[in-house]
Each structure stands twice: as structure tokens, then as C-alpha cells.
Amino acid sequence: MSEPRDLVRQGTVLVSAILALAGSFVGSGAAGGTPIQDASGGALAADATPIAPGGPAFAIWTPIYAGLVLYAIWQFLPRQKTDPRQRRLGYGVAASLLLNAAWILSVQFDLLWASVPVIVLLLAVLVWLFLTTLDTRPRGLVETVLVDGTLGLYLGWVCVATAANITAVLVAAGFAGFGLSADVWGVVVIAVAGAVGVVLAVIGRGRLTPTIALCWGLAWVAVARLTGDLLSTPTAITAIVAVVVVVSATLVCRLRAIRRTPVTQDAGVRA
């Protein structure tokens, strides 16, 4: 049965999506803001740290934002008003959208240190959303794509972005690496990111979209370290190996999930 709080939840998600979209325009420089790669003294530029992805990597925000906006509209339809799955996911999605906007503002106002707790909290929210989608079942292909697919891309990319963000803050603060070279730290951080990708593949039973986004980010780290101003062959090779390992783990887990569970019984396996 529909309750007033359902309409509040739907409205909160829709308004949060509008605010996040506005924030993205500011972050791109299109609305008078400073492009993210130039903000905070260029700490997040492609050549600022050994694990910064190349500029084109950020194009992934286009399908992520498109999916989130379409989801905000779709979940506002009457049929989704009392859907138990949307009741569980709604406020989490809204929180992720607002945290995304908050992250952009923290960088725009040169509060780079504040961006770390914001993105870590964003990552935690996305992990919770991911686990919730695994615990619930989509009602069709549209929901699988808009909900499970979009949130998977979002999570995969933010995993890479969190590592890059924390590294950028440490470098900007003058962290010397405890005497270890930038190459060593690059290899270690990328290896950890790859391990996270394998964990997501196992937990998600081969969900494709987290792997796509995470490997997209790692691939552009490799490109940036091989062709950019800050070269690091060890980091690039590690990123390439991580991509191969994560993709392989995802395919293995997906095949196992398909064999064990009929597609008609778990539509979520497709995302």
C-alpha cells in the first residue's frame, strides 16, 4: 500500500539527481567552475600522481550520470512507488548522488583534504547498494540495466577514483613514501585495486558492470603511465595485469553463476 513516505523517497531521489547533475556541470567547467583536473592546484590531473588515470577515463561519467538520471525518473513512476526493492535502495542512491556533488564542491573550493572522507563514504554507500542489489531481485531487463547496471558502473569507477583521490591528497601533502619510490607505490596501489576487483567479481557472482568500470579506470592508468608526462612502466604493466586478472575472475564467476542458477530465476546475473 502506498504511503506518503514513498512519495518523499521518490522526490528525494529525483531532487538529488538534479543536484548531482548540476554539480557535474560545475565540475566539468561548463557552468563557470574549474575543471576537476585543474582544480585544487591540479592535484587530480592525469600527471599528478603515479596512479592517476588518463583524461579520457572520465568519459565514463557520461553513462553513469545518464543511468542515474534515468533511474531517478523511472523510480518516480507509479509502479515503483511501493516496490520493496526501491524502498530499500532509494535513499542510498540519493545519498550517493549528494555525496558525489559534495565531492565536486570540496575540490572546487580547494578543500582537497575534505574530498577523502567524502569519497570514502561514497564508496561505502555504493558497496551497501551493491550488496542490496545482490540480496534482491530485479523485475525485468529495464530494472536490471537502470539499477544493477548503473550502480555497478558507479561502484567500479569509484573504487579506482578512491585510490586515485587518496594518493593525490598524500602527494599534495608532501608524503615521501617512507623512502619507497613512486614506482613501488604505484605497483602496490594498483595491485590492491585489482584485488578489490576480484573480490567484487566473487561477491557479485560475475557481475559485469563493476568490472567494466574498474578495468576501464585501470586501463587508462596504464595508458597514462606509458604515454603521459609521468611515465612508469612498472605501474603500467601492473595495471594491465590487474585488468586481465579481474576480467578473468569475473568471467569464471559468471560462468559458475549461470551454471548454478537459471537465468529466469536470477535476472541480476546479467548485470
Image (tube, rainbow, N blue to C red):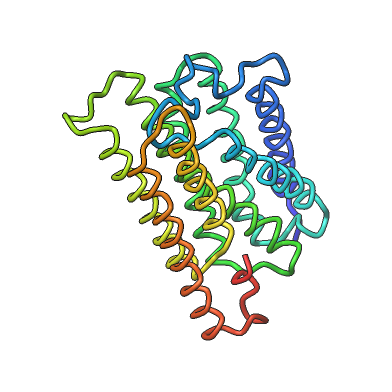
> Residue at image x 74%, y 43%?
69
| Count of marks, rendered view | 0
Pinpoint residue 178: horizontal percent, then vertical percent: 17, 30
Q: Quadrant of the N terminus?
A: bottom right
> Residue at image x 61%, y 16%?
34
Rendered view: 109 above or below 270: above
Rendered view: 50 above or below 89: above
> Residue at image x 71%, y 56%?
146
Q: Is residue 80 left or right of residue 42?
A: right
Residue at the limit of the structure toward the left, as seen here: 179
Q: Quadrant of the C terminus?
A: bottom right
Identify which residue, 271 or 49, lies in the foreground: 49
Residue at the limit of the structure toward the right, as seen here: 78
Pinpoint residue 19: horizontal percent, then vertical percent: 69, 30
Report which quarter residue 59 is drawn in.
Answer: top right
Q: Is residue 47 left or right of residue 67?
A: left
Pinpoint residue 208: horizontal percent, then vertical percent: 57, 63
Report which quarter residue 234 is drawn in.
Answer: top left
Rendered view: 171 above or below 250: above
Identify which residue, 202 or 244, lies in the foreground: 244
Rendered view: 96 above or below 74: above
> Residue at image x 62%, y 41%?
94
